Amino acid sequence: RKEVEQDPGPFNVPEGATVAFNCTYSNSASQSFFWYRQDCRKEPKLLMSVYSSGNEDGRFTAQLNRASQYISLLIRDSKLSDSATYLCVRSGAGSYQLTFGKGTKLSVIP
Amino acid sequence: EAGVAQSPRYKIIEKRQSVAFWCNPISGHATLYWYQQILGQGPKLLIQFQNNGVVDDSQLPKDRFSAERLKGVDSTLKIQPAKLEDSAVYLCASSLGGPGTSGIYYEQYFGPGTRLTVT
């Protein structure tokens, strides 16, 4: 099992829709989690950090389930500008090393 | 606040040639990372520095890749000689790092990357 697994998509959703991505991880010692977004031919940008059970920032909500070893990202009221690849990332306990998933591609359609 | 700077942005070389990339992290960030991102995949860590010391280089192909961060600020990554499979985007990132349990020390900020094509 890969350390961080994501559904590659693509997820094609209409504007205004709610969409959720799941990410599973194999290392139970994982301490912190992050969601990064990456636009085509651009660098990853930090979207959200998750240190406890979850985090919410505007239209974006991340939830962490340590028992089942998955983390989700929920996007409400999708905008065209949300179209990007969303990378699920974990860090190990006591380590700054991040392990990235391959990403989930989202396309928001007018 | 200035972000992570990288140069060059693009590089095309022939196989067996050498190439070097430069990175200047965010001011005050102790930890610097080099990642390789192949098309369709997430970034893969090559090497991690804390100040000017190497913390993790377990995934760096040391027969051809080398990196240094001499004064704990700027860093260079070199490939010598390059292979076709080295074609990728090379990303530099930095984080506060250092001691502390706060999660913000883990948050990494990326530079624009160098897109390398080996022909």
Image (cartoon, grey):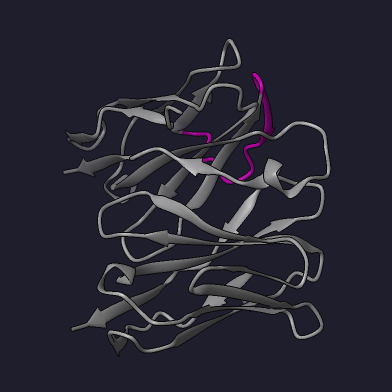
Residue A37 falls in image quadrant = bottom left
**Residue B82 drawn at (x, y percent):** 31, 36
Determine whether, in the image, residue A110 is placed left or right of residue A60.
left
- Residue A5 vertical placement versus B107 (above, below): below
Residue at x-position 55% and y-position 19%: B69
Residue at x-position 83% and y-position 37%: B100
Residue B25 inside the magenta-drawn segment: no
| Residue farthest top in this picture | B71
Residue at x-position 78% and y-position 45%: B102
Q: Is residue B36 visible?
A: yes
**Residue B9 drawn at (x, y percent):** 24, 34
Residue B2 falls in image quadrant = top left
Q: Is residue B79 visible?
A: no
Please tell me how many numbered marks the rendered image carries. 0
Q: Nearer the viewer, residue A24 or A17?
A: A17
Q: Nearer the viewer, residue B114 or A23?
A: A23
Q: Nearer the viewer, residue B37 or A54?
A: A54
Q: Which residues are magenta?
A: B51-63
Residue A102 falls in image quadrant = bottom left
**Residue B75 drawn at (x, y percent):** 48, 21
